[in-house]
Amino acid sequence: MLKKIICLLFIFVAFPVVASAAPFVTSFSKVIAQQDLNSTSSIAIMVKDASTSKVLYSKNENKLLNTASTLKLFTFASAIDTLGENYKFETAFYVYGNNLYLKLGADPLLSRKDLYELVSDLKKSVNFKTIKYIYIDDTIISKVPYPDGWCVEDFWPTLPPISP
């Protein structure tokens, strides 16, 4: 849904065209209506002609929103710079004595399939009759429920706290 709008905006920014505002108003309004974005999302859009700065389409253009997708690009660049291009996230189990440890790695690409494979390997290699305690090491994950920069008014009362 939102990806369609972002993709459309990217195309308009990357490949500016000379046109009247009417087709833009119709197409953006149509996409927003079809995806029912007005009831599920906060939307703020402004499309300008790159050569004339004429506004071709706008909706809630003065509304302040978090820069989620744009901010992800900066976070990604910072992570590569800090961690290095070849950094590997690792989620693993370790056995020490009679204890089993799950070491979380904060892997953003960890999937349900990866967890099933990890547990399957664990079942093959560990005798659970000897395991006394299971510990989860989550020290890599922040415990701050609302990090600096989050807009409090963007939260819905029914949502749980947000953290990495």
Image (cartoon, rainbow, N blue to C red):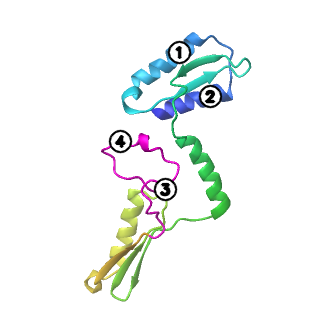
Q: Which residue is mark 2?
A: 11
The nearer-to-camera label among 1 and 4 is 4
- Check if mark 1's residue and mark 4's residue have beta carbons within 8 Å: no
Residue 141 forms part of the magenta stretch: yes
Place of residue 109 in the rendered image (x, y in percent of width and height, measured from the top left): 48, 56
Kind of element beneath mark 2: helix
Q: Residues within 10 Å of mark 2 (few under 14, many from 20)?
A: few
| Sooner in the amino-acid sequence: mark 1 or mark 2 | 2
Q: Residue at x 39, y 63 (%)?
A: 115
**Magenta span: chief secondary structure:** loop
**124 or 47, which is in the foreground?**
47
Place of residue 66 in the rendered image (x, y in percent of width and height, measured from the top left): 52, 40
Q: Which residue is mark 3?
A: 109
Q: Which residue is mark 1?
A: 25
**148 or 164, which is in the foreground?**
148
Outermost residue, right direction?
A: 51
The nearer-to-camera label among 1 and 2 is 1
**160 or 12, which is in the foreground?**
160
The quarter of the image holding the N terminus is top left
Measure the C-alpha gap from mark 1 to mark 2.
16 Å
| Sooner in the amino-acid sequence: mark 1 or mark 4 | 1
- Check if mark 3's residue and mark 2's residue have beta carbons within 8 Å: no
Measure the C-alpha gap from mark 3 to mark 2.
27 Å
Q: Bounds of the magenta span?
A: 139-164
